[in-house]
Image: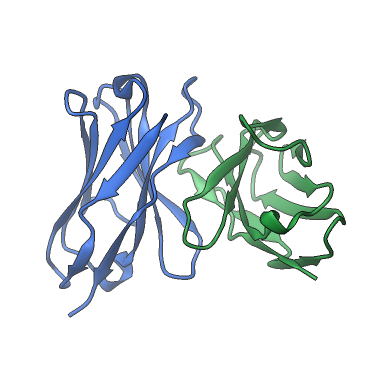
Amino acid sequence: ETVMTQSPATLSVSPGERATLSCRASQTVASSLAWYQQKPGQAPRLLIYGASTRATGIPARFSGSGSGTDFTLTISSLQSEDIAVYYCQQYQNWPLTFGGGTKVEIK
Amino acid sequence: QVQLVESGGGVVQPGRSLRLSCGATGFSFSAYSFVWVRQAPGKGLEWVAIISKDGSHKYYADSVKGRLTISRDNSRNTLYLQVNSLRVEDTAVYFCAREDRDGYEFFDYWGQGTLVTVSS
């Protein structure tokens, strides 16, 4: 099983500042990496797929990078509506696996 | 617009069974594969099952293999998850989600989830 490890567990960022979230895979997943945003009481929302492609309707302040085993989600200028838990998911290997999540909060 | 609506959750005793449903509207249901993903209270996301467009291929997480059955009825635009021999650790919100249109296993639309609580 491909274990996805996200760090940090919690990230405190001031409004307007950059937020950088990390996701590491225990074995290569090439570029088969997606990021989701989940707000309390809501379903996950697809942000990024293919490691760096924004999903439809996702603001440009969200960007993804990386390949192989190390990936990053960057929120260039944090907005209050970005407060959520962010999950990475690999779809290169079976079974499909998610990271444990990074909670982004306002400093 | 695309909508996925789960139903069938509730409080159930250990050892009992439950069938969850996910109704789809706003797109061609039979053109997509679907998954069930669950989330235990306060925990992360766990993929549990996937089914192909015509229902001929199904895969399960090892943690649920043998107790969960995913199925679909393309004539009714509905996805199902049969959960047997329920355990306390099956307590979770169960989400259905649609796979990417090109067949990559990431998920572009999700339902709101249905809560299953296993308790005596």
Q: Residue at x 27, y 69 (%)?
A: B117
Could you tell me which quadrant the C terminus of chain A lies in? bottom right
Query: In front: A75, or A1?
Result: A75
Can residue A1 be seen at all in this image of the molecule? no
Q: Position of residue A51 (x, y in %)?
A: 69, 35
Above or below for A17 versus B12: above
Q: Is residue B76 left or right of residue B52?
A: left
Query: In the depicted view, which residue is nearer to us: B66 or A61?
Result: A61
Relative to B87, is B20 above or below? Answer: above
Q: Is residue A29 left or right of residue B30?
A: right
Instruction: Name the colouring of the figure.
Output: by chain
Outermost residue on the right side: it is A17
Q: Position of residue B32 (x, y in %)?
A: 37, 24
**Can you name the residue that lies furthest to the left here?**
B16
In x, y percent, where is residue B62?
35, 52
Q: Residue at x 59, y 55 (%)?
A: A99
Residue B89 appearing in the image: yes
How far across and how far down the image is residue B4, in percent?
Answer: 35, 39
Colour of chain B as rendered: blue
Identify the residue at image location x=66%, y=39%. Answer: A28
Looking at the rendered structure, the number of numbered marks drawn on it comes to: 0
The colour one sees for chain A in the rendered image is green
